[in-house]
Amino acid sequence: MQIRQRPANSDHCLPEELHPVLQRIFAGRDVSTAAEIDYPLENLLPFGALKNIHAAVALLQDAAEQNKAILIIADYDADGATACAVALRGLSAMGVKQVSYLVPDRAKHGYGLSLDVARLALDYDPDLIVTVDNGIASIDGIAFARQAGVDVLVTDHHLPGANLPEATVIINPNQHGDEFASKHLAGVGVMFYVLLALRARLREQGWFEARALPVPHLAALLDLVALGTIADVVRLDYNNRILVHQGLRRIRHSRCCPGMLALLQVAGREPEKITSSDLGYLIGPRLNAAGRLQDMSIGIECLISDDPSQALALAHDLDALNRERKAIQADMQQAAEQHLQAMRAQSAGRLPDGVCLYSDSWHQGVIGILASRIKEDCNRPVFVFAADEDGDLKGSGRSVAGVHLKDVLESLASQSPDLIMRFGGHAMAAGLTITRENYAEFCQLFDAEIKKITAGQAPGNDVLTDGELDHADFSVHLAQQIAAAGPWGQGFPEPVFNGSFFIAHSRTVGDKHLQLKLRVADDDRLLNAIAFNTSEHAVRQADTVELVYQLAVNDYQGQQSLQLLIKHIQCN
């Protein structure tokens, strides 16, 4: 591991009253003016730049006026669940009477509006199908629905393939010819923008006044938009930071849906202290657990419930599923480490440049998390596979900087047309289905393609930090300022620092976490630090360590103290 300070934009005009460390943090994220860290709703990009937005609004308006049945087809992850909840809440608030939803079963139906899901959807007798967080790759399912006389509105953010589905209307900021400036909206963000446009049209034409309906306050949906945006790990460009910032503000003031409050309660987090990382690491996994292990309708029902008691009961169900997911994941992680050790033993200690892992016993709902963990540990693109109900293999992949995973799959499909049955995804995450017989060939071709992209050089294991801190910077006040300066997330990373410390004391807490008391040179203060899931062996016999860490506030029994959250340890 090589620690490097993040390069900073020297040409910035940030407020002088801003803490020097915060000025350095923002400069390292290409922020040059105070306006770029101010997040009012009026600075959101206008919806008019989205390609086909007026056609989408006309389709929804017609459905509302003619009392047509609308069926939302959701995805089974947190982005899909929040997008579905936003669609249901938003359309109902606008007076749409007939709106329901269908979410595919991960194991039975696979992803998106597949042919099987389209057949199932027709049982609901819809006049209009609206996909959320999916649809851009659903060519067969959409063709089937359209042949049956059902209109289809696709709202998606995934990268389009060479061929687009023949939907009635497609809204996707990443489709060819779209001029919307932010290409990083999550699926929930796309649906939110569609509702903004629909509300504007209906208000302009007197819809609400004629029906004695209040004009919907769509900002009330921003708690869900923030959750889906963070949980889907999309890039936090300025537009997304506005959405997340405003959503967090509403949660902190408990102006959010009962399901959000219930999920916070079961996670043991107070609403007024919520951060973007809490959405990603506490709330998102509990919501995702339903789609991974059972049925995402549990999560959607939690988010659309207006009954606090019902929402809390559903949140407890989600919490129980998340505990089950953790146990399954731990077993899979242990088996994966054994697979990796065997790979190294066969290749003189070196892993393939593109790593593939498979076991008959693995749960396909958890392979994405496992792929992410292995990618972090190995610093290589990874695909993890599990068997589906038909005996084929579902793969979930995670990538590293410089390797566009969906482009890799497109290249492999072009080289070997019979290799991959289905695939889709992003630069950093993708999924696919292959036959069991093609697994060995896929492993070989995937490794070769990664070798070609990286020229046989494993990606660097550099850790970028925001530099070292002075003695006076180790304070609760600065930690609070950093937390409040967010939202932090993908593409706008939470600040981390590095430095050398003397170890005054070390011990294991909770059976698996390393707790340290540290000193910096020429300072007698003891600093509390913790490294989660780290053995005391990591610092055994070491007097000093080089750490990469975050500043955090430990709130225990009403007393606040500074705590360093350790991300990396190197013994000196």
Image: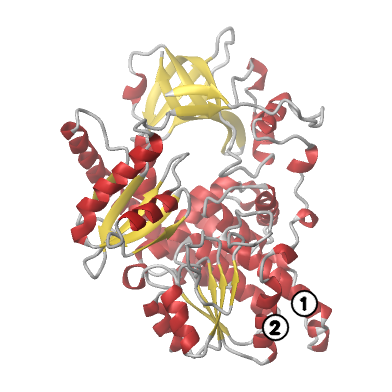
Residue 265 image position (x, y, % from top left): 54, 56
Res 28 quadrant in image: top right
In the figure, residue 551 lies in which quadrant? top right
Secondary-structure class at tag 2: helix
Q: Is residue 556 above or below residue 517?
A: below
- Residue 516 vertical placement versus 380 (above, below): above
The number of numbered discs placed on residues in the rendered structure image is 2
Dot 1: within a 10 Å radius of its alpha carbon, few (fewer than 14), some, or many (20 or more) residues?
some
Q: What residue is drawn where x is 70% and y is 52%?
A: 242
Q: Look at the image and tell me whether residue 217 can be seen.
A: yes
Kind of residue at badge 1 = Arg
Residue found 51% across the figure and 72% down from its top: 301
Q: Position of residue 348 (x, y in %)?
A: 19, 28
The C terminus, quarter of image? top left
Residue 477: image x %, image y %? 69, 30
Query: Which residue carries the number 1 mark?
Result: 201
> Is disc 2 surrounded by few (<14), some (14 to 19) or many (20+) residues within 10 Å?
some
Instruction: Say left or right for 178 vs 277.
Output: right
Residue identified by numbered label 2: 61
13 left or right, relative to 500: right
Task: Tell me if I can see residue 313 in this picture.
Answer: no
Rendering colour mode? secondary structure
Vertical comparison of 535 with 71: above or below = above
Q: Which mark is residue 383?
A: none
Q: Residue placed farthest to the top in the image?
A: 522
- Three-letter amino acid code at disc 2? Gln
Are the two marked residues, 2 and 1, in contact with CB atoms closer than 8 angstroms? Answer: yes
Residue plotted at (82% across, 27% down): 16
* Nearest the eye: 329 or 518: 329
